[in-house]
Structures are given as C-alpha cells and as structure tokens.
Image (cartoon, rainbow, N blue to C red):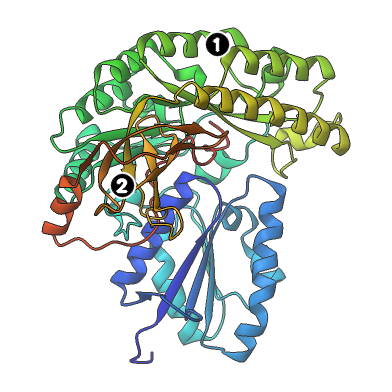
C-alpha cells in the first residue's frame, strides 16, 4: 500500500439510519488511516444505499456509470457500495458494475476497511454479507458530522410486516440495546459538547420488546431528562401501533424532550391501511395526535403519506385528504407508491395507473403545503429558541441571515445582526414572516447563548460539516415506520 494517505468520501442515500451508518463508515476509515477528502477526487468513494424506492436503483447505477471512466483512468481509485440496496442486490451490483471494488451488507459495516484492502491486494472485487447483525452500530468508531448534534441508535431492525416495505428483510428483526448502554453513550457525547441527540430506531417506540418492557421507551425519555447539559432530545420514527399514553406524558413532563412528533400516517383510508398491514386505523391515529396536542404545548406534528398504493380508489384517497385536513400536519412527506421487488404489494394485481397516482400526489401536495403554511403563519410574532446549524449556519453576504432549528424542529432563517454567532449557539429571536417550509426572523436576536459552543471548543472538538440532528421535519422517516 502506498505511504501516501488515501482520502475518502461517503455518499448517503435514504433515511436517518443510513446517515448514522455513514458516520460509522467514516469513523472506520479514519481509524484505518484514511482522511476525509477536502478537494478534488477522493481515492475511495463509498455509496451507502437505500432500497425503498425505485429511483434508488437508478441513482446508484447512474452514479456508478459516471465513475467508470475515472476508474479506468486511475485503477487505484476504489468504489465501495453498502447499505440496503447492497444487501438486496448483492452480487448483482458487481455483475452490473464490475469496476466496483467492494460490496457489503447492512450487517457488515465493520468490514469496509478490510474489504477495500483485500480488493487492492487481490486485484478483484470483494463482497461480504451477513443475515444477522454482527456488531451494534454504536460499538463502531464514528466520525460525526456535527459537534453539537448526534444520532444515538437504540434499536435496529423491525418486526413489522408492512406489505410495501422491504426494510425488515434487509435490516432483520428488531434488536434493542440495553438502557444503560444508551445512556452511557449519551453522557459521553454530552461530555464532548453535544447538546442535542436524536434517538434512532426503525420503530423507535417499540423499544423494549426484546427484553419485555412495554414502557421502556417512555422510561428512556425520562432518563434523558436527567442528563445535565443535554438540552434537546428528539426521536424518530414511532409507529402508531406502539404509541402509548406514557410516551406522550414523558414528552410533556421532560423539558429537554422537544415538542415535536413525527408519526407516519401512510394512508387515511382504513381499507388501504389494512392492505398495507398497518395495525391501526385512522381514528386511533387521530386520537394519538389529539392527545399529543392537548398534553404537549406547541407540539409540531409531521408525517409520511403514500399515494397510489395498489387498489386505492378515489374514495380511499378522499379519506386520506379528510384525515390530513383533520390532523393539520405541520409538515408532510408525501410519496408516490412504487413497487419494490420482494415486497407483497409488488405482486398485487391492482396497481394504479401512474398518471392517476401523479394527479393524486399533486392534489395532496397542494393541501399539505397550505396546512403547513397556515401553521407557520400562526407562529408569526412568537419568540423561538434556535440552535444554529452546522450546514446552514453561514452568513449570507446580502442579508446577514443564519439558519437553525426551533425547539419544534421548524427551520428558521434569522438575522444575525452582525453578532458573533456560530454553529452550536442558541439564539432567541422573534418570528416576523412565514413560508410553507420555514420561518423568517428579520429583527435583531433577542439573546445569544454561546455556552454550548464554548464548552465544545474547550473539549478540543473540531467541526465536521453538516448538522444531522434536526431530523423528523427535515427529512422523511424510516419507510416502514
């Protein structure tokens, strides 16, 4: 191997679990002596893939095709493919793109550096797949993208059997970490300057099923509230089937658990929910969010919705619109159904005409956008606390604006007023305008708290780049949740 330090780049597609896995891949490569690429072409590029939607395949193979000439021109350049699509397609990836050097499954993240080195030595592609989890992700080294926000996995895998979702077959059955391990990791992160954590799981509020404690998730939220220095706790994504009143009470009574709930609806039609094998109905769903709004002041609620599921009639779609109207979501992530090989729904014989699906998608998009805008307009005049972002916390030369997330996870563009404000600071500002997807604060900040940033600097931390902690209203949830 050349004595020159090799550089890498990790490209991530898909959900929050993939983003967290990518941090582990980066950490493994750094531990193995690689450096993250800062400019030009990297020596190694890793694709962490998603298998949820049809265009996921197209995106991966399109990217691999564009890299073929680079590989021909520089045989030492290496390409690795991991994640859900790698677990699904396995050897097919090397068959379709023989210039790929390494392919590894969702349970084989730890093997990445070894596979790359084997490929270099042997001069041929390497692949490794396991059917069960080998190492819990948090046991692996990590290179976080943010100083102040961090993901914390509390479980992996999923026990649900939704007919549209391939994730359980790729991630396996649910495995839960013990509460003590989770809390120890969080405390260690806080000691490094982290002030916001997001608890991750494919079905996060089913946490505890493996060790038989139905109240384990609520207990975990309350325990997070006792960690000094931890200012914001989020989680994603819960399943309506497993949502219990004690979780809502824990959210309401634990000050550092944010007033934000992302809970996938998927459809407002009970008939479609049954065909999806979603073990709740629209009334139960609405009852949960009604209770959340009663008990948690200012809670923002977001969701995922699939349009055009096989067999969906116009009446079914109208029922979805009615539920959305009643729920008044603060943010909605809407998707046109696409069949995924290996899922039961892909074999249903009543697939919907794509033009009808597209039309319904556009109609739903208009409604959800208006509801989100109405919700944002209601906040104009309120004071909000904003945690300044890593990725967007840069001053705009023309406006002096910076960007961050409010406690309820709404995106806020605010006026820095020439003050010394950096990523990791907490700013209180007044909302002056609203748009469908963000809030604007044009006045000078009311207050600036730099203590978190100063503490992180005193710990000797260094920034990595993008801020991953604001999740549920910033990106869609796990597809099976």
Front in this rendered view, residue 88 or 480: 480
Q: Quadrant of residue 211?
A: top left
Q: Does residue 177 lie above or below 273 as drawn?
A: below
Where does the image place residue 331, in percent across and percent down from the top left?
Answer: 55, 30
Where does the image place residue 153, in percent across and percent down from the top left?
Answer: 35, 42
Disc 2 and disc 1 in contact, CB within 8 angstroms: no
Q: Which mark is residue 32?
A: none
Q: How many marks?
A: 2
Q: Does residue 273 lie above or below 389 as drawn?
A: above
Q: What residue sits right under mark 1 in the picture?
A: 286
Q: Name the residue rendered at 62%, 40% in the picture.
A: 166
Spatial CA distance of label 2 from label 1 is: 31 Å
Q: Name the residue rendered at 54%, 86% in the picture.
A: 123
Q: Does residue 460 lie above or below 379 as drawn?
A: below
Q: Answer yes or no: is residue 308 visible.
A: no
Front in this rendered view, residue 187 or 372: 372
Q: Quadrant of residue 360?
A: top right
Q: Secondary structure at mark 2?
A: strand
Quadrant containing the N terminus is bottom left
Neighbor class of circle 2 (other Cα within 10 Å; few <14, some 14-19, many 20+) is many
Neighbor class of circle 1 (other Cα within 10 Å; few <14, some 14-19, many 20+) is some
Q: Name the residue rendered at 71%, 21% in the picture.
A: 275
Nearer-N-terminus badge (2/1): 2
Where does the image place residue 89, in percent across and percent down from the top left?
Answer: 65, 57
Q: Name the residue rendered at 65%, 62% in the picture.
A: 60
Q: Which mark is residue 149?
A: 2
Where does the image place residue 58, in percent across and percent down from the top left?
Answer: 71, 58
Q: Secondary structure at mark 1?
A: helix
Front in this rendered view, residue 132 or 116: 116
Q: Answer yes or no: is residue 12 visible.
A: yes
């Amino acid at each position: 191997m050349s004595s020159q330090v090799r550089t890498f780049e990790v490209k991530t597609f898909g959900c929050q679990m993939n983003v967290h896995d990518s941090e582990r891949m980066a950490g493994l490569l750094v531990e193995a002596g690689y450096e993250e690429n800062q400019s030009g072409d990297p020596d190694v590029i890793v694709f962490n893939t998603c298998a949820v939607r049809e265009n996921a395949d197209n995106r991966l193979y399109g990217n691999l095709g564009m890299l073929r000439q680079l590989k021909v021109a520089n045989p030492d350049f290496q390409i690795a493919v991991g994640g859900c699509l790698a677990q699904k397609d396995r050897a097919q990836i090397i068959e379709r793109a023989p210039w790929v050097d390494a392919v590894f499954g969702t349970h084989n993240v730890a093997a990445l550096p070894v596979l790359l080195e084997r490929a270099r030595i042997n001069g041929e592609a390497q692949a490794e797949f396991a059917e069960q989890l080998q190492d819990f992700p948090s046991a692996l080294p990590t290179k976080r993208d943010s100083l102040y926000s961090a993901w914390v996995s509390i479980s992996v895998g999923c026990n649900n059997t939704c007919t549209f979702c391939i994730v359980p077959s790729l991630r396996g059955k649910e495995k839960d970490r013990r509460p003590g391990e989770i809390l120890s990791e969080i405390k260690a992160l806080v000691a490094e300057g982290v002030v916001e954590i997001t608890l991750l799981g494919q079905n996060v509020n089913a946490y505890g099923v493996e060790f038989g404690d139905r109240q384990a998730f609520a207990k975990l939220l309350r325990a997070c509230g006792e960690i000094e220095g931890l200012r914001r706790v989020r989680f994603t994504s819960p399943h309506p089937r497993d949502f219990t009143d004690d979780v809502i009470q824990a959210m309401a009574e634990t000050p550092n658990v944010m007033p934000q709930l992302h809970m996938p609806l998927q459809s407002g039609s009970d008939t479609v929910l049954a065909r999806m094998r979603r073990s709740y109905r629209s009334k139960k769903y609405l009852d949960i969010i009604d209770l959340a709004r009663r008990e948690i002041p200012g809670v923002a609620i977001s969701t995922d919705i699939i349009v055009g599921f096989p067999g969906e009639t116009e009446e079914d779609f109208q029922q979805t619109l009615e539920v959305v109207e009643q729920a008044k979501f603060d943010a909605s992530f809407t998707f046109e159904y696409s069949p995924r090989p290996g899922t039961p729904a892909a074999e249903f014989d009543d697939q919907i005409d794509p033009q009808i699906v597209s039309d319904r998608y556009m109609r739903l998009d208009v409604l959800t956008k208006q509801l989100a805008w109405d919700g944002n307009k209601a906040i104009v005049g309120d004071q909000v606390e904003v945690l300044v972002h890593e990725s967007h916390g840069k001053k705009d030369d023309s406006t002096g604006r910076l960007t961050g997330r409010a406690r309820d996870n709404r995106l806020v563009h605010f006026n820095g007023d020439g003050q010394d404000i950096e990523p990791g600071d907490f700013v209180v500002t007044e909302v002056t305008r609203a748009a469908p997807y963000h809030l604007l604060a044009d006045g000078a900040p009311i207050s600036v708290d730099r203590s978190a940033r100063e503490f992180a600097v005193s710990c000797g931390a260094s920034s990595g780049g993008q801020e991953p902690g604001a999740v549920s209203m910033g990106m869609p949830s796990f597809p099976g949740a």
